[in-house]
Image (tube, helix red, strand yellow):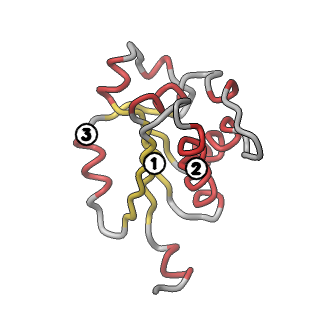
Amino acid sequence: MGTYAEAMTRELLVKVTCGDEAPERLNQGFTVAATAAASGVPVSLWLTGDATWVAVPGRADSFSLDLATPLAELLETVLELGSVTVCGQCASRRSLGEADLVPGARIAGAAAFVEEALRDGVQALVY
C-alpha cells in the first residue's frame, strides 16, 4: 500500500451514473470527489445518466439527504478545485447544451472519458 504522498501524485476520475432515484449513491460520488479535490488531489467528475441534471443551475439545490453535505456545496467545491464534465449523449437525450449547465461544467463524449481514464496515474471510481 502506497503512502499518502504517493497517492497525491495520482488523479481521481469519478463517474456518477445515478440521480435522485439513488440519493445515497449520488451523494457519495460527489462527497468523494469534493473531499479529494479539497485535499489537493486533481479530480475530474463525470456526470452521466440522471446525474446529468445536477449540472443544471438550481438542480443541486433541490436535492436533500439527511446527514449529508448539501449537493450544491459539493458541486461547487469540485467546480472550483477540479473539473465537471457531462456526458455528451446524456446531455443530448435531455436536450441540454453547455449554456444550460452551471458555469464551469462542460460537455464531452466517450472518447474524452476513455482518454482521461487511461492516462497514467489515474484512479477511476464509478458510483
Q: Amino acid at mark 2?
A: Gln
As measured in the structure, the alpha-carbon distance from the residue carrying label 3 to the one carrying label 2 is: 23 Å
| Label 2 to label 1: alpha-carbon separation | 8 Å
Tag 1: amino acid:
Tyr
Percent coordinates x, y for residue 120 in the rendering? 30, 68
Q: Which residue is mark 1?
A: 127
User: Which is nearer the eye, 127 or 99?
Assistant: 127
Q: Residues within 10 Å of mark 2 (few under 14, many from 20)?
A: some
Note whether 10 is above or below 3 in the view shown. Answer: above
Q: Residues within 10 Å of mark 1 (few under 14, many from 20)?
A: some
Vertical side of 33 occupied by 121: above or below: below
Q: Are the residues flagged by discs 3 and 2 in contact, CB closer than 8 Å?
A: no
Q: Earlier in the sequence, mark 2 or mark 1?
A: 2
The label on residue 110 is 3
Q: Is residue 125 above or below residue 110?
A: below
The 10 Å Cα crowd at callout 3, few under 14, some 14 to 19, many 20 or more, is few
Q: Amino acid at mark 3?
A: Ala
Disc 2, disc 1: CB below 8 Å?
A: yes
Residue displayed at 53% across by 49% down: 29
Which residue position is annotated with label 2? 28
Residue displayed at 46% across by 50% down: 44
The residue at the far right in this view is 67
With 108 as the anchor, is 79 left or right in this view? right
Q: Position of residue 2 (x, y in %)?
A: 47, 85
Q: Earlier in the sequence, mark 3 or mark 1?
A: 3
Comparing labels 3 and 2, the label whose residue is closer to the camera: 2
**Helix, strand or loop status at disc 2:** helix
Under circle 3, the secondary element is: helix
- The disc placed on residue 27 is none
- Mark nearer the N terminus (3 vs 2): 2
